[in-house]
Structures are given as C-alpha cells and as structure tokens.
Image (cartoon, grey):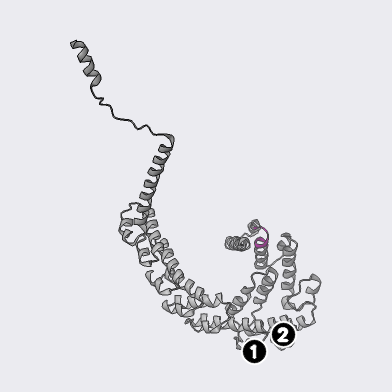
Amino acid sequence: MFGLRLHRKKEEAPSKAKPRLNLGHHERIRLYALVTVVLLALALVSLALQIHPSGQKGCSGIVLSQPRDNCYLSMANYTDNATVCRSISSINSQAGCITSIALSKDNATICAGLANSTTYYYQCVTQISQKQQNPTDCVLLSEPYSSQCAYALATNQSFSDNSTCAYVSNSSQASLCNSMYYYNTAISKSNPGYCSQLPNYTDRLIVDSILQQNTGNYTLQLQQVQLAELNLTPRGYCYYRLASLTSNYSLCAGQPGVLGQLCSYGESSTNQTALPLNASVCSSAPSQIANVCTYAVLISTALTSENLSACSQISDINYKYACITAYASKYNSTACTQISNLTYRQSCYASATSNATVNSTP
C-alpha cells in the first residue's frame, strides 16, 4: 500500500519543464513579420537621429571620418542648412556641400561659409553668378577672383552683353572682354561699325581669343590659327572676317600688309569664306601665305580623308604637331605618339580626350 501511494504522488507531482509554444504556420509568419517591423522601426529611429537637427551631436560620436562626414552631409542636405557642412572634415566635401545648398537657394552669400580668397569660394560664387546670369554676385569676391568671375560669366554669355564686362576690374581682362563683345556683335549683326571699336594694333592675346571660339570646326580652326601667325590687328581681322562672311571685300580693302593682300586674293578667289584648300591655287597665293596654303591643303587632306601620313609631309614642326593633334582629336588619340616633344604630345592627348568627352555627352 505504501508503495502504491508513493507511486501516485510521483505521478501527481507537477512537471517543472518549461512550456513550449506550439505555433501553427500562420502564427509563425505573423511573429516573424512583427519582429521585422520592430527592427525596421529601430533602424528608422536611428536614421532620424542622424538627420534631425538635434542629431548633429550624434554625428560627432561616429569614430570613422568618412561615415561621420556622410552623416553631416545627409543632415545638411535634409535640413538645407549650410552651417552643418562646416563640420565635415574633408575640405572638398565641405565645399561641395556648401556650394550645393547655395545653388539650391540661389544665394551667393551662403558661399561665405567657405574661406575667402580660395578657389572653393570663387567656384561657388561663379557657379551661382552663371546660374542667375548676375554679375553683381562677383562683387562678393576679392581680386583677382572678382574679375575672373565676371569674365567667366561674360564667356558663358558668349560676350553678348558688354554690361557684364563692366564688372571686370582687371584692366587687361576688361579690354579683352570688351574686344570679344565688339567682335562677336560685329559678326552676329553683320555690322562693321563694331569692328571700329577694336584695337588697331597687333594684340596676339585678343586675336587668339577670337580665333579660339571656332574650336568646333577643325578646318576653320586651323586656318584661323594660321592667320594668327600673320600678326593681324583685332580690328583688321574683324573687317576681314566680316568681309569673308558677307562676300563684301570692300570692308577690308586698303588694309595694310598681308591682310590687304588676303582681301584682294579673297575677292578674286572662288572660295571667299576661307583660305584656299586646293593645292593648285597655292602657287598663285600671296608669297606671305604660300607655305600656309600648302600646310592647309595637307591638314585638310589628313582630316577629310583620314590620312595621317599627310601630316608628316608638313615641314614646319608647329603645323605638323597641329595637324597630328587635330587628327587625334577627330579620329584616334594613338596618333599623338608621332609627336616627339613631350609637352606637345601631352597637349595632344589632352585635346583628344577632351573632344572624346564632348562627343560622348548626350
């Protein structure tokens, strides 16, 4: 009896094992979903603490500089607050952050968050000046950046507004800016009156700047670079170019030296818009440009027929390098290897790369 009673007590004793949850399939799915939602909420809270204004202190607690800078950058962009950008340790990232917010607000004074008299400050103000087409923004800069900013805006406007040139304080840049305005206006309006405002003395800087505007047309570019070698005056070239475009060579008649001969030759030539590119006519060209005429024919052959060997027939080393560079820019940069001078070769590669980038831009 006693043994039986003891056995019953053991059977009646409550079990100390932990209860197990016997969840069905749908219950488990709901539980997993709940856990996922909780974790996602925690992540969102963490992100909010980083980008909220009160979370700036939280960014400073991040040990690694790159994630810390990213935290400040995210908060600055989210709050549109350029002062937060100053906490970014990378100078480049800080400048990009401040410039981005200044551009979004069209407010050049925000650029003052960058150190004055630095290229970062200059670039920030210049970008906003060009976006708003407003030269008064450039006044925020000290020299020489103020003049550079106004001149950059004038360039962006294709020198169509001489009031922008008034903000260029540097005398040589101001002269160049106004000269570009008078030349471009003379050509765009076919009005020789603007040519008379240009300097009537040899100024290679102004002539080169005028000629460099035609970089999109290889043949015209090279022909005009050849003209620059003739020491033309800005005023004389303006008359000659306008005469060529309008087929009215009376505009440049009477010009002294080579320009007068070019005018007379252009009037008698069937090709009145550029230097002749036919080898048969080079012998009858003025003596001062006979070689230039031959070089032009060879350069034209190289570019129109994709014939690099034509460049090697040019005796003048500068024209030969110009021919190879133009060929490399138009067809294949490997042509630059034929230039022995290291400086010119590097320039060739840079020109070819730049042109390839422009052509690949949609």
Instruction: State which quarter of the image contains the C terminus.
Output: bottom right
Q: CA distance from mark 2 to mark 1?
A: 19 Å
> In front here: 353 or 337?
353
> Furthest-front residue in view?
1
Quadrant of residue 49 within the rendered picture: bottom left
Q: Is residue 263 magenta?
A: no
Q: Position of residue 11 (x, y in %)?
A: 25, 19
The residue indicated by pointer 1 is: 193
Is 86 left or right of 2, judged from the image as shown? right
Residue in the picture at 66% in, 87% down: 191
Q: Identity of the amino acid at label 2?
A: Gly
Foreground residue, 208 or 186?
186
Residue 154 shows in this picture:
yes
- Magenta stretch: give its range: 327-332
Front residue (pair 138, 171) = 138
Residue 80 location (% of width, % of height): 40, 66
Rendering coords of residue 184 (x, y %): 62, 81
Q: Is residue 212 left or right of residue 107?
A: right
